[in-house]
Amino acid sequence: MLDVWMHDLPPSRAELIERSRGVDGLLCLLTDKIGGKLMDAIGPQLKVISSMSVGVDHIDVAAATARGIPVGNTPGVLTDATADQAFALLLSAARRIPEAERFLRAGKWITWQPNLFLGADFADATLGIVGFGRIGQAVAKRAQGFDLRVIYHSPNAKPAYGARAVDLDTLLRQSDFVSIHVPLTQKTRHLVNAAFLAKMKPNAILVNTARGGVLDQTALYNVLKSNQIFAAALDVTDPEPLPMDCPLLELENCLIVPHLGSASKKTRDMMSLLAAQNLTAGLKGLRLPNCVNPQVYKNHAGI
Ligand code: GLV
């Protein structure tokens, strides 16, 4: 039997428990919080948790591993779309596109002016990438076409696309643009805090397409409000959706969109397919094509 939640809003905790109790497999979205208590409420027959997302910070993966439940995600297929989004946000913030469009729609465009909405140049600027996994590297690849110098900080990642590895302090002090591509973990929560932001250049632009929790929004508000950095562009926030009274929304130099990194038709189709393949493999007792906790398999070689 297949039970599909058909509403736009995610199920409440009570609804999630009630509807998922007794299921053999669970396919969830990043809006569903899946913890050990829920896994226990579902029951010991639960064979697989499959998320239609690459990030799995909404799932207690350690709890799933402890219960022998494989967790599936959707890596790879959203790399290009998310890197495109990071670049779109960077260009939009650098050239002040949303601000200029608001100005036009408000009927304020009276003439061409030499100093109207002056933005940042790309040629000869330095892009710093924090987290050089698949998506970070795809951003570096795009940066080559814009003549950007690219540096990155990411433990253990090998250089690619002409990017050079540096320590985080060097990255922050040298970069005109900083793009965040780390998963949200206990270690990366509020990685972008007041101390991080204070090291950035006064002309710097920060882009976050990773997870809202990686960034301390109050610290970001303070540096944007006092123009200590030029701008920020956020695809993700904490919480999501962002409450309309969030002070960041008062700022012209903060561009925010509603978590759309992977939002292209083809990408979402492929994510759905991967999530379904993980689910059906798990239900059949087969190894998930994309499993974030392969330790659950007896013949796992070890990570
Ligand atoms: C989107 O943010 C994802 O993790 O897939």
Image (cartoon, helix red, strand yellow):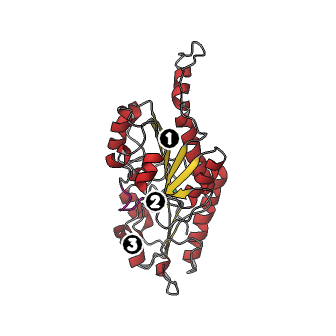
Numbered disc 1: secondary structure: loop
The 10 Å Cα crowd at callout 2, few under 14, some 14 to 19, many 20 or more, is some
> In the rendered structure, which amino acid carries the disc numbered 3?
Ala
Front-lying residue, 220 or 175: 175
Front-lying residue, 192 or 121: 121
> In the rendered structure, which amino acid carries the disc numbered 1?
Val
Instruction: State which tag comes first along the sequence, 1 or 2.
Output: 2
Q: Does the magenta stretch include residue 187?
A: yes
How far apart are the two marked residues, 3 and 2, measured between alpha carbons?
16 Å
Q: Which residue is drawn at 40% across and 64% down?
A: 34
Q: Which mark is residue 45?
A: none
Numbered disc 3: secondary structure: helix
- Going by the picture, which residue comes out furthest to the bottom? 299
Instruction: State which tag comes first along the sequence, 3 or 2.
Output: 3
Q: Which residue is drawn at 52% across and 59% down?
A: 132
On the image, the x and y values in percent for residue 174 come to 47, 47
Q: Which mark is residue 183?
A: 2
Locate residue 146 relative to residue 128 in the image: left or right: right
Quadrant in the picture for residue 133: bottom right
Residue identifier under label 1: 257
What is the magenta range? Answer: 184-189
> In the rendered structure, which amino acid carries the disc numbered 2?
Pro
Dot 3 beta carbon under 8 Å from ligand 1:
no
On the image, the x and y values in percent for residue 302 come to 48, 82
Front-lying residue, 34 or 256: 256
Residue identifier under label 3: 62
Asked whether the viewer can see residue 172, the reply is yes
